[in-house]
Image: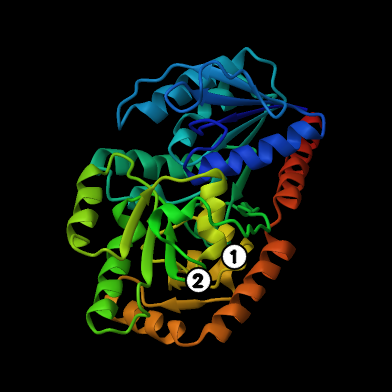
Amino acid sequence: MKIALIGQKGIPAISGGIEKHVEEVATRMAQQGHEVFVYVRDNYTDKNLAKYKKVNLVHLPSIPTKHLDAISHTFFSSVHALFSGYDVVHYQGIGPNLLNWIVKFFKPKAALVSTFHCQDYYHQKWGWFARLSLKIGEYMTCAVPDSAISVSKSLADLSKERYGVDSKVIPNGAELAHTDSVKNIAQWGLKDKSYVLSVGRLIKHKGVHYLIEAFKKLEDTSKLPNNFKLVIVGDGFHTDDYVKYLRTISEGRENIIFTGRQSGDTLKELFSHALLFVQPSESEGLSIALLEAMGYGLAPLVSDIKENLEPIGPCGFSFKSKNVDDLRDKLAYLLNRPHEMRAAGMCARGRIESEYSWDSIAQRILGEYKNVMEKKSK
């Protein structure tokens, strides 16, 4: 099959859940002999990189502003796709799916597929017009393509209830991993099992401010081990004010560490040696960072939104979303019960192996492509 993926910033993934998803799926499809084309933006992917792990990278321009970067690149990608002879065109995310009608109308023989990753209009960086556009994009994601995929059951339920569309649940994934090395994290004075970890973009709906406040309360009441730390991995995305706010409320707190965005061996070490992974988000699609933490055998403590509870299943702990005191209490409880955390971490690792393997996810998406192509050929 000749397959195009549209809507992601690019690969290899530097940051962003959609980018990680596309990289993992596209490279596996290419390794199986399919012709895979990923549309990329030059402000994300090295413009000199034409191929990555057998995946063809199609560089097209965009208008690099907060509101126009994604939609302008999607427009150019969609028009380019009309003349490229693809068997499958797969749009990622509700924003880019705002333009999936271009392929539907002008290239009706191609299999048009969408993936519903997240209700992005809940992200507090967007104004009213962007949120309205994203809600229209959500409708287009569910109702227009030949096949709609949702990364979680909760998003599939929403698709059914709101639009009457039965979307296929094919989740994000993760790999089992671990490293004994600590050479990269030594720069922050980190030792094995001496810190709580949070990984993700520093955007308000991710709820990192709740975690900081809960940690400060534990520190102020001497309920943390000596030199125990909170490590926050990630950077902002058009959210400079929020990043500044997080740093302001952490001033004078030597045990709250902002590492910035990390990848590769450093990120592996951060996951491998944390004691607990905390996901305090107010809204999610299906967090790849959470799945990755579980793949490292980390016990997860998550806000009790259904998008977080679904992946952890019986293998983790939760607190009331947006409730700093409940988060504080759950942290205090778990830090005094390392055996419970180890058991939850082992359970989480097994759950990733059995239900969230990237290999099986890529196969299921390919199967959906084939189903659509067969139906359209009749």
Query: What residue do we see at 70% from left, 69% from top?
Result: 350
- Structural distance between the alpha carbons of marks 1 and 2: 15 Å
**Residue 109, quarter of the rendered image:** top right
Q: Where is residue 221 in the image (x, y as percent from the top left)?
A: 24, 84
Query: What residue do we see at 30% from left, 70% from top?
Result: 322
As drawn, 60 above or below 154: above
In the picture of the structure, the residue carrying the numbered disc 1 is 294
Q: Where is residue 155 in the image (x, y as percent from the top left)?
A: 52, 57
Seen from this angle, which residue lies furthest top?
83
Q: Which of 185 and 305 is in front in this view?
A: 185
Indicate the secondary structure of the residue bearing disc 1. Answer: helix
Relative to 227, 22 lies left or right: right
For residue 193, the mark is: 2
Indicate the secondary structure of the residue bearing disc 2. Answer: loop
- Callout 2 amino acid: Lys
- Callout 1 amino acid: Met
Location of the C terminus (image quadrant): top right
Query: What residue do we see at 38% from left, 84% from top?
Result: 332
